[in-house]
Amino acid sequence: MKAQKRRDTAVELALRRELWRRGLRYRLQQPVADRRRRHDLVFSQACVVVDVRGCFWHSCPAHGSLPKANREWWRDKLRANRDRDDDTAQRLGEAGWLLLIVWEHDDPRDAADVIERAVRDRRSRAPIPAASRPGGK
Ligand SMILES: [Zn+2]
């Protein structure tokens, strides 16, 4: 079994459809604060990234579990994933990005509500670069 996160999971696709329907545009699988780590959805203008996390691989508080076979190996493996998640969150925070986490058990519409609010709020506060202001060249 590979630890590689599956891409385009059902919840991620449902979430993307919902955000698109609400007029929100994003980029997929972009690195932000760390070139080695790509994020599922990136809203560059608002400095918001969204990671969709699998309950098992990322030890969700509600459904995280440890397989009975090869317990030690799994414990280390899952702990390493959590450490990496923590490190990623810290790097993003230091770089001024807001990280929103969507678990695979989350309702895509509820998740979209949170994301939409954050993106619209941060976008409206972001300074507009001079070059893109009308007549501001
Ligand atoms: Zn879960």
Image (cartoon, grey):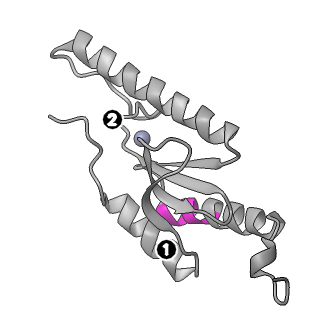
Q: Position of residue 53 (x, y in %)?
A: 41, 45
Instruction: Single out the residue that lies furthest toward the front.
Output: 137
Q: Compare marks 1 and 2 and give the one earlier in the sequence.
A: 1
If the picture is divided into quarters, which one holds ligand 1?
top left
Front one among 42 and 65:
42
User: What residue lies at 85% left-to-right and 83% top-to-bottom?
Assistant: 136
Q: Position of residue 82 (x, y in %)?
A: 44, 27
Is the C terminus in the top left, top right, bottom left or bottom right quadrant? bottom right
Q: Tell me if mark 1 has few (under 14), some (14-19) or many (20+) residues whose alpha carbon lies within 10 angstroms of its own.
A: some
Q: Is residue 34 above or below residue 130?
A: above
User: Residue 18 — which label?
Assistant: 1
Q: Secondary structure at mark 1?
A: helix
Front one among 111 and 28:
28
Q: Amino acid at mark 2?
A: Phe
User: Residue 98 — which label?
Assistant: none
Looking at the image, residue 121 sits to the left or right of residue 80; the answer is: right
User: What residue lies at 18% left-to-right and 36% top-to-bottom?
Assistant: 2
Residue 36 sits in quarter:
top left
Looking at the image, residue 30 sits to the left or right of residue 129; the answer is: left
Q: Secondary structure at mark 2?
A: loop
Q: Which residues are magenta?
A: 108-113
Q: Is residue 4 above or below residue 112?
A: above
Is the N terminus in the top left, top right, bottom left or bottom right quadrant? top left
